[in-house]
Image (cartoon, coloured by chain):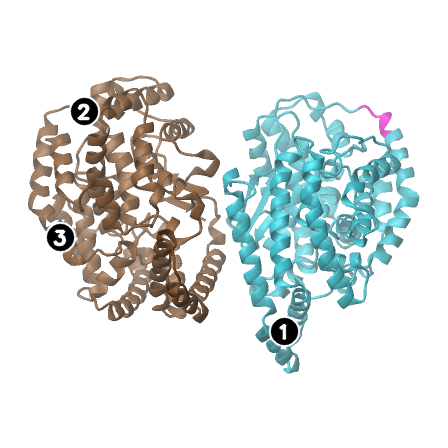
Chain colours: A brown, B cyan
Amino acid sequence: MQTMMPPGGSKARSQALAELSVLQHQLLTAEKTGQLLEQAQQESLDDTDRANLLEMRRHYDNAVLVPEWLVEAKSLAGARCEHAWRSQRPANDWPGFADNLREVVKLSREEAQIRAQAAGSSRYDALLNLFEPGMRSSDLERIFGDLKTWLPDLLQKVVAKQAQQPCLMPQGPFDVDTQRKLSLSVMKLLGFNFDAGRVDVSAHPFCGGVPEDVRITTRYNDQEFLTALLGIVHETGHARYEQNLPRDWLGQPIAQARSTAIHESQSLLFEMQLARSSDFLKILRPLVVAQFGDQPALEEGNFIRLNQRVKPGLIRVDADEVSYPAHVILRYEIEKALIEGDIEVNDIPALWNEKMQQYLGLDTVGDYRNGCMQDIHWTDGAFGYFPTYTLGAMYAAQLFATIGNALPNLSDDIARGDLSALFHWLQQHIWRHGSRYPTETLIVNATGESLNPHYFRQHLENRYL
Amino acid sequence: MQTMMPPGGSKARSQALAELSVLQHQLLTAEKTGQLLEQAQQESLDDTDRANLLEMRRHYDNAVLVPEWLVEAKSLAGARCEHAWRSQRPANDWPGFADNLREVVKLSREEAQIRAQAAGSSRYDALLNLFEPGMRSSDLERIFGDLKTWLPDLLQKVVAKQAQQPCLMPQGPFDVDTQRKLSLSVMKLLGFNFDAGRVDVSAHPFCGGVPEDVRITTRYNDQEFLTALLGIVHETGHARYEQNLPRDWLGQPIAQARSTAIHESQSLLFEMQLARSSDFLKILRPLVVAQFGDQPALEEGNFIRLNQRVKPGLIRVDADEVSYPAHVILRYEIEKALIEGDIEVNDIPALWNEKMQQYLGLDTVGDYRNGCMQDIHWTDGAFGYFPTYTLGAMYAAQLFATIGNALPNLSDDIARGDLSALFHWLQQHIWRHGSRYPTETLIVNATGESLNPHYFRQHLENRYL
């Protein structure tokens, strides 16, 4: 749908997907399903079955709350909004987009209201819980509140420091077919299983599919290849998690990825912790040169600086890891207010401009396509998703710090292009567990402590100050 | 699945499709569906609704006969057989293939038995009726029996005549990307709507998807481009039928293509009646030369001879239109005996060899991959499908003869590359009617008479003798 479908197929596909989501909802919420879950609860189960049942129960409880008409209406409104967004964004057509988004927000608020009532939580927490079970906005206020105390200052210092370090830009054009070959060679280095997945081109990069057939996408620009390349590394992190979920339980809830934040921790571990480290960039550089030939901007020192550049910009997906949390906090604050009913869709652009100015010092007035229309998430009604990006960055930093302690030769291994010990550690401590443990348990088992934002700050300071 | 899926995704996809086919079957055969159909029968309906209800009834009656387990088992066995066939065919592995095929045949016989009992027909007729409603094997015996009296003789005469006409083969290689560009230019000439479809590469060419998103495929060979090119023309005929089914009723039975034979009549009208005519070849030639440059084999007279060559061969999909019916009769006789229980899977190779010798004078002993393993149809249990290819060729000849009378300037129009009157006629007389009328009525309305094989014989004699 995202990579191959001709535009005329959109309506029929949306209708088919809405129909399927209703059928899926009917099956999951059937009276019989509830009875079977009750029965299973009474049986003597081993740890695995018990964990699986707990996840089934969670899915069932989440699904049974939402009436069928709302599931279908959300799916249709989301598909319509997203499809129109594809042409509205290039046209900077905010009024047109807002019309569709209002419907998505209205339905998302209804869903949030129903879930909040059942959970005894706030509306926003009820949605957040779908992506990151156990996380509350009070936790986010604390974590993001702390970030806001030191991040703008760090950002300023890094930008000032890097202003002293000249950095050459690679000179294109960079042939798209050659970029594709480079992507494939990097995916191979990172252990992507091509028997169980592929890479294509789409408007917005993503990782999707099923563990046996993981589809990742990128978008190429023939004037600049690093964004696509590091995007490939990012999606490959997602893909390897999916491809290594427990095979014996595929199709069962226990074999699903733990949460969106843990998923993001894997992509960011690949992209930020691993691929933008000086160690890795030294082995990435020859792969780039093999495809495009050498040039001054690809000299080792410059290549490292290029990939560790910090430059506040308008586009979240292209942001460096220092300014990225500012994008997330901005969206979190807006979407929380939107779902709680404190603001309306029409209020978004002004708020967006104000916060972009405040957190990143950038002006976005009138530039909707590089402002509040840049992302796909709200079009589908995925409110509560954005915070998981920064939680993921924090989990990634914490995991990589732990791996560094567990594997004293890691730096040498990377220099030799041998990533097997790193991947083995991730396989043992994260991938193979799927959803067997709650996020908290998974992280404590893997790192010895709960989520600790200190590692993220330490990582940024070590790399950039 | 056929064009993009990595091999590791096959099992999960098969399971998902089997699950969907069961859900679809459950919905169609639900008690409630039967009750609604009964109710609708009593209502006062206009002609369109009445025709639509008749088709709904036919789908319901066909579906309600087959138990759910059999639907799922057939889907799974078919997917397994087809997937294994993809590697077994190149390996010429008949014993491996036969193991899977036996299961498909066993389940197809069970289905045929159930349907035959309900219809009071033979087993084979019960399956034939799914593809070509109203057609009986007694009709086929008559039509194919007649063909067998004159076709082998005609074939011999044509081969002898063409032996006197030297024909140069185009010298390759023919770059696959350039072939793709040529395909696109020919699809454009033939009116393919690229907003509602696309062309890709697959092991076995097909036309699939939905009217709003029609997917056609081909397979390129860099030593020989005409097979792929005329294959594209063929699938474009299928595609234009789909893309022009009545928009107001899409998703309803009345908006579906009438039958597999009528579908094939459109592809063969495009490929055989139109594209291999001297008129059309004269405008196709410059498109070919524009991509590959000129060469002696592309001189007009030789280009026409190339595309009207008759040469009995092993592969049905590559066969010329004179020898094609022999391939179909062979498969019809074998699959009928298989379904009726007169032979077993193990008997296929010997029978195949015997009939290839008898009808086409060719030896296939031991060459399973170019013999009984060449086609995909039996792998999916599509018994009763093959006859519709030759019925389609006969409908195509009858339709094109009618069009020739209705459009006295057709030959000049084609020479000017103006196919609009031809497509308008097809739109008015075939495409826009979908399944509103039974095949018999559709053809009588369009041509003034029932299926008359005389037109097919006349076409072959006119073109080739």
Q: Does residue B443 appear to the left or right of B229 in the view shown?
A: right
Magenta stretch contains residue B276: no
Residue placed at 30% from the left, 60% from the top?
A101
Q: Is residue B49 or residue A234 the one in the foreground?
A: A234
Q: Chain of mark 3?
A: A
Asked whether residue B381 appears in the rendered view, the answer is yes
Image quadrant containing the N terminus of chain B: top right
Q: Chain of mark 1?
A: B
Q: Are marks 3 and 1 on the same chain?
A: no
Distance CA(mark 3)–CA(mark 2): 31 Å
Tell me if label 3 and label 2 are in contact, CB under 8 Å.
no
Q: Does residue A179 appear to the left or right of A412 in the view shown?
A: right
**Is A62 rendered above or below residue A281?**
below
Q: Amino acid at mark 2?
A: Cys
Q: Does residue A446 appear to the left or right of B445 in the view shown?
A: left
Query: In what element is the residue under mark 2?
Result: loop
Magenta residues span B161-166
Query: In what element is the residue under mark 3?
Result: helix
Q: Are marks 3 and 2 on the same chain?
A: yes
Residue at the spot of label 3: A354
Tell me if label 1 and label 2 are in contact, CB under 8 Å.
no
Tell me if label 3 and label 1 are in contact, CB under 8 Å.
no
Disc tally is 3
Which quarter of the picture shows residue B369?
A: top right
Asked whether residue A224 appears in the rendered view, the answer is no
**Horizontal and vertical percent for residue B291?**
59, 28
Q: Amino acid at mark 1?
A: Asp
Residue at the spot of label 1: B49
Residue at the spot of label 2: A167
Residue placed at 39% from the left, 26% from the top?
A185
Image quadrant containing the C terminus of chain B: top right
Q: Is residue B311 or residue A130 the one in the foreground?
A: A130
